[in-house]
Image: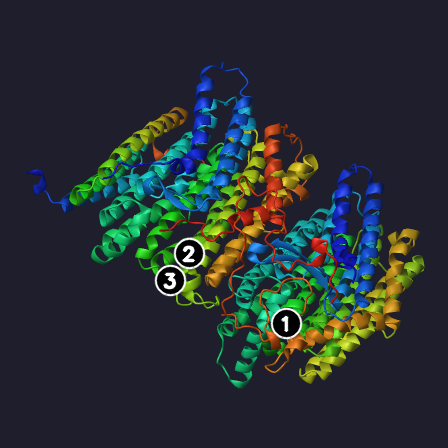
């Protein structure tokens, strides 16, 4: 075996993660010198700055040509670079939210931000992993950090319960995925995704059981991570119990990273197997997730829990995009809508799907973090143990008490519901356009109807804010400037990207979003 | 070479059995610590599979993978146990059925 | 056309939004200033709309005029393309006229959250103008959906007792329809425009479908089914797409049987909400049929002409019968809308020039007469806060001026000759009898006129004539100056539109002919009759001579774009970068090219 030789180019893609890790270490070390009473305001600022720097590096990496780096253990492509940007934006917003949240509970410590940044680094690296062990390690980096974050307020019973559930199911999912990876390794003799497709084509003939079992286990592991129905049961409890800024990070960043990795693995591997198989699997997951996610959210009065179910539903829309990636091959009805021969445009259409998925991830990230941010702004510590901190009543009459917050929350709700002119609408257009292009008319219709049901529960929040009087003695929540900055930033981004998406779409306008061998 | 007398499929069978036991354990057992152990069992089943395949193919990737998995599992165990302790402290029990306060 | 003309519609659309931004700066408690500013904004918008109308009607012979195009999201072929044809210009004018009147109508009615109310009005105005002017299907969709939010708030926040339910019903009904339309819209966009150069532009989509529509027509009529891929796709999915479009617009119209949201919404909405809803928003449905559903899928529309006509007639008769049964005046007016809009729909699906012109004219009439009815009833409601017919009686004695106004508007609503309503309904019925629809459709529709007279006059009689039955009504004050000034324009419009309809009809007729040609497309309709010719947007299908649309399967090179390589981000990137090279002259500041 040759001695590996690396150039600087190999390390470009890991620089954002490096920045985050460095900042995390600084935060942890600096905590040593602080008394418990010392002001820790610098910590969230430092986290935001680190995220900003990392995001800028990620943005500049967008321009680079896709290539395999670090001996093929990772890749550098616009797909992962864009994820870097999304994750950094999400983490920065979540860190801003966390500042006010933690101060209020006397729980602000450098370790919290450090864990957040470690998790973000894990997400970024997960997005560019092109080898199963790398993928597993990064998945664990992000997961272990989020387990700890979820249980951060460890004296409360809910956070520890949420952390416990998340840990058990997360570790379970990781183990499933790992075992699947082991089986695939057995079938092919390699763990590098880019090299697997070739041997897999052979192996699927000689040892189909091994290959399909491996596929199934890996897919199930990912389905857990992205909270697709029927692997979603941990989501509502964990999202409800976790500290709200952490929930925001989970719903946006963790999910985005898991989706990117999912796409990379299955686009890389599925040429070897009958494409009908992943198509059926993912379209089934998509339908179940879209429909059940929305239906289960309908009766929720607890807004935080409602947003948890809504995040399941949004995973369903993304899953629809993933299903569209595999629609071409086996499905004979596919392609009737398209006007050029099947083979020629397949890669371009795949690219459209990638574009849709990425744009949707960005849109969902800013919107969901904003929505959770409003909850952060409204919740009171005393009510958390009783569980009514997130009740719809908390939103009653918000429009007269805090018009700005009510407006921001309205924007988020409309964006989640996919109503123009918000980023959620445009994301849906891009995603569904790609799905319809791939011939998934039926699935698109199901998705649209499901999202119409979704609008009902999003609007209910608006109804409470604008059309119900504030309850007697409702406290006007105190302002925390970091929270407000985060809210304003997400609201502006939600509308801005919805009305003038030019910079984003131009960034995604390339034919080589995903590196494939 | 007494070890080579055991063919690879046996290792794989053992690993698969361990994995299934672990998975079942996670799904049916009620004690948080046992569930936790079952997850470790699943990870080790994956480990064993990697090693068996690596030996079968004479390939080094599987061996390296095993090291990584061991390291990661240790980190995971540290955080996991801490969480279990936090749960025990706040509720005085590690029975999963009693860790159900949030309702749908 | 001057380069100013090409931006005129931008001003029409966004003037209210600019004023809305100004309004944000005003303090919350300055209710008078807020109202005045909104009024000025609406007035400015009216002047702009009227000017646009004049410029349109003297603006040459192109179908679409006052066009403006700017790149928006070139990556998916979405452009900001606006322009008006005859019907759109007429509706824009009506929307403009309504704006200031709506503000005046709610001058005293709304006392709560005044600033938010007027913000919603202004935003709604922008959305409605935008939807009417859009020449890009997705842009239309954006405005179409964006209208929902302010209207939802208008009903839900400032409505009567059951407002939340009504608002929710309104929103969800409309949304379900339009989400399905979004899927269909994506489908038609993918079929009609070539891969690699997909475009949401109305012209590209329509022109891209002409050839396929012809083939589908030939296939269904003559059995010559040697279809190109696009025609194949259109034949397979066309009906579904048509129904998705039709459902979205039918809910908005509303056609029977998806009208059930309307009575609730109207009853609960504040005066301003009812007026806008009746006068403009319902027209979005008929306008959608006119602009999108029927022309894009002519063979399906022709095949389903009779069922659609039957639904329209059911709407006419059912709406009228429901009116007879109503005791709530606002509900009665709402059901009369169902009936009147039935005429508009019948005029569209009859597919004859008279009927189409009448339908468009009826849209304007209905805006005037029903808008005025809601306004006038709003004045009563403001005094008494009850809605039942039995709560009133003999008002003619206490409110003579008001009664006179109400009666004139009633005449318009029941289409008495000499009023505007007569011309619209007459043209629709004439066109229906001339069409290939069976005779009984026209006959049944005509009974609607009789029924209409019955329910309106009965209501007027019970409310206004006879003795004053209730003590509370004795002391009612007649209209004050503001109310008079609000109602007077409507009465003037009723009379002017009834006696001198020619100028308005002339503008409408400019788009009737192309609409009929598109709706009745057959395999031998010549291209130049139906082709949508627009000035500005770069149509991706470089049409070869003879107007033959290239087979959609043809390979069109993807847009060649410079590789985007910017080290840190794209925030500074101007929107027009990446636009095709044939940029409209006004955008570049270059001298206008005369057509």
B48 relative position to A444: left or right = left
Q: Quadrant of the N terminus of chain C?
A: bottom right
Q: The numbered mark 1 sits on a residue in which chain?
A: C
Task: Give the labeled residue for mark 1.
Answer: C294
Question: Could you tell me which secondary element the residue under label 3 belongs to?
Answer: helix
C445 relative position to C390: left or right = left
Using the numbered discs, state the Cα–Cα distance from disc 3 to disc 1 in whole angstroms. 35 Å
* Image spot of residue B69 (x, y percent): 28, 35
Query: Which mark, residue A329?
Result: 3
Query: Which mark, residue A325?
Result: 2
Q: Please state which of residues A250 and A239 is positioned toward the viewer in this rendering.
A: A250
* Image spot of residue C587 (x, y percent): 70, 54
Measured along the vertical axis of the image, is residue C287 above or below residue C567? below
Q: Callout 2 environment at 10 Å: few (<14), some (14 to 19), or many (20+)?
A: many
Tag nearer the camera, 2 or 1: 2
Q: Callout 1 environment at 10 Å: few (<14), some (14 to 19), or many (20+)?
A: many
Q: The numbered mark 2 sits on a residue in which chain?
A: A
């Amino acid at each position: 075996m040759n001695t590996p030789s690396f150039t600087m180019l190999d390390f470009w893609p890991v620089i954002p993660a490096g920045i985050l890790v460095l900042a995390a270490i600084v935060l942890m070390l600096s905590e040593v010198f602080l008394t418990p009473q010392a002001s820790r305001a610098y910590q969230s600022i430092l986290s935001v700055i680190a995220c900003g720097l990392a995001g800028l590096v990620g943005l500049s990496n967008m321009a680079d040509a896709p290539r395999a780096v670090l001996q093929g253990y990772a890749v550098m492509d616009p797909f992962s670079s864009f994820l870097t940007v999304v994750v950094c934006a999400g983490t920065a917003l979540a860190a801003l939210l966390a500042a006010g949240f933690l101060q209020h509970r006397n729980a602000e410590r450098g370790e919290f931000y450090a864990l957040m940044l470690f998790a973000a680094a894990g997400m970024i690296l997960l997005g560019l992993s092109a080898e199963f062990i790398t993928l597993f390690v990064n998945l664990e980096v992000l997961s272990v950090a989020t387990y700890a974050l979820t249980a951060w307020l460890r004296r409360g019973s809910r956070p520890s319960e949420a952390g416990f559930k998340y840990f058990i199911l997360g570790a379970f999912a990781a183990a499933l995925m790992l075992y699947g990876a082991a089986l695939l390794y057995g079938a092919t003799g390699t763990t590098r995704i880019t090299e697997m497709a070739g041997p897999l084509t052979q192996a699927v003939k000689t040892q189909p059981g091994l290959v399909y079992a491996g596929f199934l286990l890996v897919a199930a592991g990912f389905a857990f991570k992205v909270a697709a129905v029927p692997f979603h049961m941990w989501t509502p409890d964990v999202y409800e119990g976790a500290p709200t800024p952490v929930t925001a990070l989970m719903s946006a960043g963790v999910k985005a990273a898991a989706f990117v990795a999912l796409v990379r693995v299955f686009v890389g591997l599925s040429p070897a197997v009958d494409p009908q198989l992943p198509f059926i699997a993912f379209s089934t997951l998509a339908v179940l997730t879209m429909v059940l996610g929305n239906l289960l959210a309908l009766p929720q009065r607890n807004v935080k829990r409602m947003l948890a179910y809504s995040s399941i539903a949004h995973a369903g829309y993304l899953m629809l995009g993933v299903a569209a990636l595999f629609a071409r091959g086996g499905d004979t009805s596919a392609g009737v809508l398209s006007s050029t021969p099947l083979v020629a445009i397949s890669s371009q259409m795949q690219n459209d799907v990638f574009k849709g998925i990425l744009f949707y991830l960005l849109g969902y990230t800013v919107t969901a973090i904003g929505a959770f941010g409003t909850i952060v702004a409204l919740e009171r510590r005393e009510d958390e143990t009783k569980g009514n901190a997130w009740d719809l009543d908390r939103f009653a009459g918000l429009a007269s008490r805090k018009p700005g917050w009510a407006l921001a929350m309205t924007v988020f709700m409309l964006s989640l519901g996919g109503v123009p002119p918000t980023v959620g609408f445009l994301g849906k257009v891009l995603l569904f356009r790609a799905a319809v292009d791939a011939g998934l008319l039926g699935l698109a219709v199901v998705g649209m109807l499901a999202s119409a049901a979704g609008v009902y529960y999003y609007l209910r929040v608006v109804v409470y804010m604008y059309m119900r009087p504030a309850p007697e003695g409702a406290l006007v929540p105190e302002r925390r400037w970091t929270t407000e900055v985060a809210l304003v930033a997400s609201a502006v981004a939600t509308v801005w990207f919805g009305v003038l998406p030019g910079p984003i779409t131009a960034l995604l306008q390339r034919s080589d979003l995903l590196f494939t061998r | 070479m007494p070890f080579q007398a055991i063919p690879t499929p046996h290792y794989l069978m053992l690993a698969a059995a361990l994995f299934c036991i672990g998975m079942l354990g996670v799904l049916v057992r009620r004690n948080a610590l046992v569930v936790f152990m079952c997850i470790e069992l699943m990870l080790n089943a994956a480990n064993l599979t990697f090693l068996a395949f690596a030996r079968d193919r004479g390939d080094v990737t599987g061996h390296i993978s095993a090291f990584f998995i061991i390291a990661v599992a240790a980190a995971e165990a540290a955080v996991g146990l801490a969480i279990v302790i936090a749960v025990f402290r706040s509720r005085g029990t590690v029975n999963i059925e009693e860790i159900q306060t949030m309702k749908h | 056309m001057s380069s100013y003309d090409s931006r005129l519609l931008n001003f029409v659309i966004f003037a209210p939004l600019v004023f809305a931004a100004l309004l944000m700066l005003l303090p919350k408690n300055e209710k008078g200033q807020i109202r005045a500013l909104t009024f000025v904004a609406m007035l400015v918008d009216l002047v702009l709309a009227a000017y646009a109308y004049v410029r349109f009607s003297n603006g040459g012979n192109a179908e679409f005029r006052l066009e403006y195009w700017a790149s928006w999201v070139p990556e998916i072929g979405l452009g900001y393309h606006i322009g008006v044809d005859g019907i759109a210009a007429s509706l824009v004018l009506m929307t403009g006229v309504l704006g200031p009147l709506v503000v005046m109508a709610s001058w005293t009615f709304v006392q709560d959250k005044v600033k938010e109310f007027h913000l919603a009005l202004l935003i709604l105005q922008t959305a409605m103008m935008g939807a009417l002017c859009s020449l890009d299907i997705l842009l239309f969709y954006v405005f179409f959906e964006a209208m929902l939010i302010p209207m939802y708030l208008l009903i839900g926040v400032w409505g009567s007792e059951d407002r939340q339910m009504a608002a929710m019903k309104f929103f969800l009904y409309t949304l379900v329809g339009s989400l399905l339309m979004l899927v269909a819209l994506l489908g038609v966009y993918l079929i009609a425009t070539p891969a690699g150069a997909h475009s949401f532009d109305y012209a590209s989509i329509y022109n891209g479908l002409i050839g396929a529509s012809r083939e589908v027509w030939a296939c269904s009529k003559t059995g010559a089914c040697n279809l190109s891929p696009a025609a194949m796709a259109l034949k397979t999915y066309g009906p579904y797409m048509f129904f998705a479009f039709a459902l979205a617009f039918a809910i908005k119209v509303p056609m029977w049987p998806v009208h059930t949201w309307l009575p609730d919404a109207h009853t609960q909405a504040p005066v301003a909400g009812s007026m806008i809803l009746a006068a403009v928003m319902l027209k979005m449905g008929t306008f959608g049929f006119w602009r999108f559903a029927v022309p894009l899928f002519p063979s399906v529309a022709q095949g389903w002409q009779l069922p659609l006509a039957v639904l329209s007639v059911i709407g006419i008769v059912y709406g009228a019968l429901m009116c007879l049964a109503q005791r709530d005046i606002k509900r009665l007016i709402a059901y009369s809308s169902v009936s009147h809009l039935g005429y508009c729909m019948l005029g569209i699906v009859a597919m004859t020039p008279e009927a189409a012109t009448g339908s468009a004219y009826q849209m304007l009439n209905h805006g005037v007469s029903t808008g005025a009815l809601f306004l006038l009833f709003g004045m009563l409601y403001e005094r008494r806060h009850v809605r039942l017919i039995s709560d009133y009686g003999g008002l003619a004695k206490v409110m003579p001026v008001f009664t006179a106004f109400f009666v004139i508007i009633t005449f318009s609503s029941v289409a008495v000759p000499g009023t505007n309503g007569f011309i619209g309904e007459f043209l629709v019925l004439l066109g229906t009898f001339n069409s290939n629809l069976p005779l009984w459709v026209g006959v049944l529709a005509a009974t609607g006129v009789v029924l209409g007279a019955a329910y309106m006059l009965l209501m007027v009689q019970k409310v206004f004539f006879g003795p004053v039955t209730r003590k509370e009504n004795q002391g009612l004050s007649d209209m004050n100056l503001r109310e008079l000034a609000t109602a007077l324009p409507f009465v003037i419009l009723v009379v002017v539109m009834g006696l001198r309809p020619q100028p308005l009809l002339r503008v409408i007729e400019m788009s009737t002919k192309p609409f009929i040609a598109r709706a009745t497309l057959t395999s031998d309709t010549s291209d130049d009759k139906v082709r949508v010719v627009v000035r500005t947007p770069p149509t991706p299908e470089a049409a070869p001579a003879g107007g033959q649309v290239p087979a959609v399967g043809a390979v069109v090179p993807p847009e060649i774009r410079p590789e985007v390589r910017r080290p840190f981000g794209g925030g500074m990137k101007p929107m027009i970068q990446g636009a095709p090279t044939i940029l409209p002259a006004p955008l570049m500041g270059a001298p206008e090219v005369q057509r």
